[in-house]
């Protein structure tokens, strides 16, 4: 795992955009997995700038988004379809039929999940998967659980995630309770993973993902087993990484002993 700590959100976003751009320069027909949320917004802006000012060419790039809410039509401003077109796809020269986002309005969600997974395979798998991270350590919409979910699947969102995402909606009741998400297996099969996290609210999730035990209670911790992960953080996101691994393990062991007592 490589970890870059940038001084702020802007620097983090440029670094992330450069990593994505390098992937495309090296392999113009790359399959890129994309994330939504507030974290990658500036990365997308920088990629748009690289396209417009420096000729970064998306004409052969294929994309797969991580997730989508169930029940929001594409034109809904809170759907990830809307987000991706508005923030990114409308401003670059990607071919529309190379864009893939799970269809949260599908009449048969289980079939949609199976088809989505198959489509990724048909394209030869994901070359570079961009991830954000939830405060609870979720990646995509893989929420903390007792098991690692496998392929693309339907998820019930955690209360914490619904609360966190309520800021984009008029009221919390409007936040969908269910989503389609690539699974942990889908993400782990990506050849490279690029995880972004900024702000101190993410520091604990980042810390547990890097130094904690590998557990489905912190879904991102599974990335410790991936052979090619790059984390790009700002100082806020990285602020707990200064503690030593030994200290963290001792704390963990103490907590476990106390819980057993
Ligand atoms: C959302 C998305 C994730 C995203 C995460 C963090 O719920 N499903 O893909 O990475 O939560 O979001 P944000 O970047 O807004 O903090």
Image: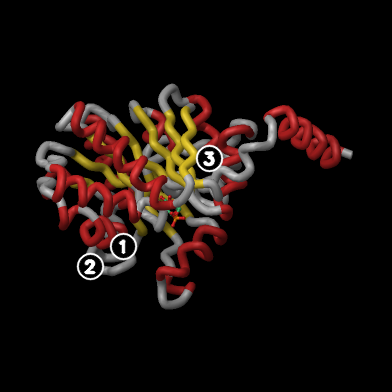
Look at mark 2 in the image and give the residue it sits on: 75
Q: Nearer the viewer, residue 252 or 124?
A: 252
Is the C-beta separation of discs 2 and 1 under 8 Å? yes
- Mark 2 Cα-neighbour bin, 10 Å: few <14, some 14–19, many ≥20: few
Measure the C-alpha gap from mark 3 to mark 1. Answer: 23 Å
Cβ of mark 3 under 8 A from ligand 1: no
Q: How is the image coloured?
A: secondary structure
Residue shown at 18% from the left, 39% from the top = 62
Residue 131 lies in what quarter of the image? top left
Q: Position of residue 160 (x, y in %)?
A: 56, 59
Look at mark 1 in the image and give the residue it sits on: 79
Task: Classify the position of the C terminus by image quarter.
Answer: top right
Helix, strand or loop status at disc 1 = loop
Helix, strand or loop status at disc 3 = helix
Residue 142, can we see it?
no
Look at mark 3 in the image and give the residue it sits on: 219
Give the mark nearest the N terminus, 2 or 3. 2
Q: Position of residue 126 (x, y in %)?
A: 28, 32
């Amino acid at each position: 795992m490589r970890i870059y700590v940038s001084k702020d959100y802007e620097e983090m976003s440029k670094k992330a955009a450069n990593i994505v751009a390098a992937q495309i320069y090296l392999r113009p027909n790359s399959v890129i997995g994309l994330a939504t949320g507030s974290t990658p917004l500036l990365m997308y802006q920088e990629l748009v700038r690289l396209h417009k000012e420096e000729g970064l060419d998306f004409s052969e790039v294929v994309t797969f988004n991580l997730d989508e809410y169930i029940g929001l039509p594409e034109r809904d401003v809170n759907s990830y379809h809307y987000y991706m077109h508005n923030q990114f796809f409308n401003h670059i020269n990607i071919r529309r039929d190379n864009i893939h986002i799970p269809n949260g309005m599908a009449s048969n969600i289980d079939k949609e999940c199976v088809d989505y997974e198959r489509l990724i395979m048909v394209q030869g798998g994901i070359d570079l998967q961009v991830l954000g991270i939830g405060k609870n350590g979720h990646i995509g919409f893989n929420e903390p659980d007792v098991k690692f979910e496998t392929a693309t699947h339907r998820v019930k969102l955690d209360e914490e995630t619904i609360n966190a995402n309520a800021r984009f909606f008029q009221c919390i009741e409007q936040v969908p309770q269910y989503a389609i998400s690539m699974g942990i297996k889908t993400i782990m099969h990506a050849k490279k993973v690029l995880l972004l996290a900024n702000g101190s609210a993410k520091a604990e999730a980042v810390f547990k993902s890097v130094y904690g035990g590998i557990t489905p209670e912190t879904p991102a911790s599974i990335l410790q087993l991936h052979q090619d992960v790059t984390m790009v953080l700002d100082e806020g996101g990285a602020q707990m990484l200064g503690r030593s691994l030994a200290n963290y393990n001792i704390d963990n062991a103490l907590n476990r002993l106390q819980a057993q007592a």
